[in-house]
Image (cartoon, rainbow, N blue to C red):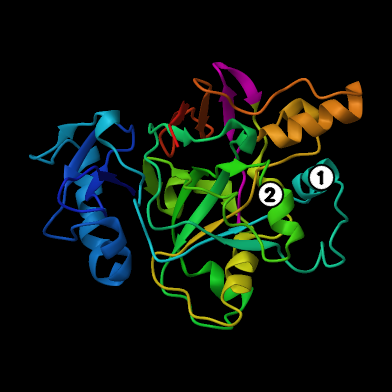
Amino acid sequence: MKLGSLKSAKSLDGELIVVSRDNKKAVKVPHVAPSLREAIEKWSQVEKDLQKTYEDLNAGRAAQAFDIKESDLHAAMPRTWLFADGSAFIHHIKLVRMARKAEMPPTLNTVPLMYQGECGGFLAPTEDIPQVDFSHGTDFEGEVAVITDFVPMSISAEDALKKIRLFIIMNDVSLRGLIPEELAAGFGFFQSKPASSLSPFAVTADELGEAWKDGRIHLPLEVNYNGAFFGKANAKDMFFHFGQLIAHAAKTRNLAAGTIIGSGTVSNEDMNMGSSCLAEKRTLEQIHEGKITTPFMKDGDTVEMKMLNSKGENIFGTIFQKVRSVKK
């Protein structure tokens, strides 16, 4: 099934909707759950009702169906209790560390990298990316992510896969100019990781079909920058799968229902696949051309992200954002 959230003046969690497979129609389901966050918290109780509504909607039997307007859509889940972002694509790790002249971690192939990001309010998929100072180096990062049920502490990686309830894509906004000093201080990301955006729709595993296997989504993430092709890296190249990322996050704590676990920037070694962030492209320019020619994002720049299945269907809807300068 496919779920989303309408913007709401009454709730920061938005209003839960069931969305048709073609992304064109939706139905409100206040009798089931007021928001996606609350639906996840009682998933075993509401899943069947949501699935029935989804089937009725796709069959044209939903009397209260309405046309979707992109401007009315919030992030699939506008806020939650925890967002933990991994870095499961080794090629990306190597490139960004090369860019800031940092050594590779000795546990690169054995322990996932992860940080805890902003989760109190995600940007809507068509919402501007605010920037107060362009010396901060605004960058986008195309990722895939999962939303979990409650996850108990010390869960195994295989059992963790069973706790995945929904899938999304996301733009993990990064401020590259702030990252080196923050990491040099030895206490991780904070100011360099502002609010990110989520896709308009979250889907269950059956919507991915055979593309969901081995704990990974075997599909390319399409990224366009200022209206031109930028990348189509395939998410199947995750070194650590989602079960391993979830288990890593839950090593010493329970994870609340609604936890979002990100894959990190989708990245492939094949240069023909392009990139999913500017930092990678800039590093590749330095390596192969001897100088960086691509600047970080500036006022008015746009980024678009989507993931299509083998039938050409836009699974998660589209993230389309513009950078907007705001006064300090």
Residue 53 left/right relative to 260: left
Q: Is residue 76 left or right of residue 315?
A: left
Give the SS element for disc 2. Answer: helix
Q: For the C terminus, give its image quadrant.
A: top left
Q: Which residue shows up at 49% across the image and 56% down it?
A: 146
In the rendered structure, the answer to whether residue 218 lies left or right of residue 255 reads: right
At label 2, which amino acid type do we have?
Answer: Ile
Residue 269 is inside the magenta segment: no
Residue 296 in sight here: yes
User: 10 Å neighbourhood of mark 1: few (<14), some, or many (≥20)?
Assistant: few
- Discs 2, 1 touching: Cβ within 8 Å: yes
Q: Give the range drawn in magenta.
A: 216-230
Residue reaching furthest to the left: 63
Quarter of the rendering containing residue 107: bottom right
| Residue visible at 59% across and 31% down in the picture | 134
Residue located beneath label 2 in the image = 179
Label 1 amino acid? Arg
Q: Nearer the viewer, residue 277 or 5?
A: 277
User: Per the image, is 225 magenta?
Assistant: yes
Q: Residue at x 13, y 41 (%)?
A: 62
- Residue 137 makes an appearance in the image: no
Q: Estimate the x, y position of residue 264 in percent, counting from the top left.
A: 63, 50
Mark 2–mark 1 distance (CA, rounded to whole Å)? 9 Å
Q: Is residue 295 above or below residue 158?
A: above
Q: Is residue 63 above or below residue 194?
A: above
Name the residue nearer the viewer: 229 or 311: 229
Choose between 78 and 182: the one closer to the eye.
Answer: 182
Dot 1 falls on a residue whose secondary structure is loop
Q: Identify the image quadrant of residue 39.
A: bottom left
| Res 257 → quadrant | bottom left
